């Protein structure tokens, strides 16, 4: 009788047994490295989400309070918290991060302990991350063009969501969970750090094109 809870593909086993903590560029993404990434990224995301959720709580207690993350008219988390986009599901968006990032951290801890996770788990985590990244894109657009103000804690979450998504895609292609040609797999796995940097450059370029003048003038 097959134990579905422990079923993994042969490529997943290869991923679990590989550790590229000190491997050169182009080496496979190891399970322990992936675990460490998830713990760090999830921890940073949780800290930023909790900080913003706490600021929202304090604001409810004292509506006249100026949030600690409000620096000037342009770098102001108060504008984001008070907008309708700041509570898309009827409650403050940071609560989503407070609930979701512990799952990411727990997944990383399980990998560091040598646990082999089934495909359905990775697929579920990836779907959740894709939805989270879609929300981030919407909030970035809102901040750049509608609110015209940047929330520091929000930007921390934006920063960690991209590698959280990207390295899951790399892991999925490498393990065979995500279908891809051999050429595409080699490009994604071998150039994963370069592509990660390109993503950050594109995000900064978008920011500067949208609000660069206002950002410089605010300081």
Image (cartoon, rainbow, N blue to C red):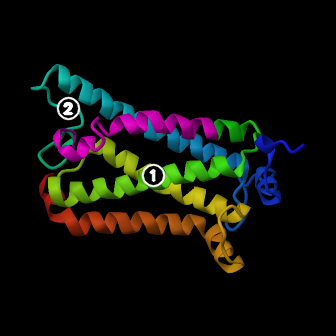
Bin the neighbour count of mark 1 within 10 Å (Cα to Cα): few under 14, some 14-19, many 20 and up.
Answer: some
Q: Note whether 170 is above or below 55 in the view shown.
A: below
Is 93 included in the stretch rendered in magenta? Answer: yes
Mark 2 lies on residue:
67
The percent coordinates of residue 117 (x first, y second) are 72, 45
Would you say the magenta stretch is mainly helix, strand or loop? Answer: helix
> What are the residue bounds of the magenta stretch?
80-107
Is 69 included in the stretch rendered in magenta? Answer: no
The answer to whether 126 appears left or right of 138 in the picture is: right
Mark 1 lies on residue:
161
Foreground disc of the pair 2, 1 = 1
> Residue at the location (18% across, 61% down)?
145
The answer to whether 72 appears left or right of 188 in the picture is: left
- Sequence-wise, the earlier of marks 2 and 1 is 2
The percent coordinates of residue 135 (x first, y second) are 36, 53
- Examine the rendering and report whether any part of residue 24 can be seen: no
């Amino acid at each position: 009788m097959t134990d579905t809870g422990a079923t993994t593909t042969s490529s997943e086993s290869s991923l679990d047994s590989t550790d590229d903590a000190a491997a050169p560029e182009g080496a496979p993404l190891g399970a322990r490295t992936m675990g460490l990434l998830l713990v760090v990224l999830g921890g940073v995301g949780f800290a930023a989400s909790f900080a913003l959720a706490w600021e929202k709580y304090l604001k409810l207690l004292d509506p006249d309070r100026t949030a600690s993350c409000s620096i000037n008219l342009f770098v102001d988390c108060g504008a984001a918290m008070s907008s309708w986009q700041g509570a898309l599901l009827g409650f403050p968006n940071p609560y989503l991060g407070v609930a979701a990032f512990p799952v990411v951290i727990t997944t990383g801890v399980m990998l560091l302990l040598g646990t082999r996770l089934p495909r359905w788990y990775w697929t579920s985590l990836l779907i959740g991350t894709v939805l989270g990244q879609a929300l981030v894109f919407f909030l970035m657009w809102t901040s750049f063009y509608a609110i015209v103000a940047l929330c520091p804690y929000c930007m921390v979450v934006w920063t960690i969501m991209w590698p959280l998504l990207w390295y899951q895609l790399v892991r999925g292609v490498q393990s065979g969970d995500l279908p891809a040609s051999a050429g595409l797999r080699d490009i994604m796995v071998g150039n994963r750090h370069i592509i990660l940097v390109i993503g950050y450059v594109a995000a900064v370029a978008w920011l500067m094109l949208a609000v660069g003048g206002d950002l410089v003038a605010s300081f």
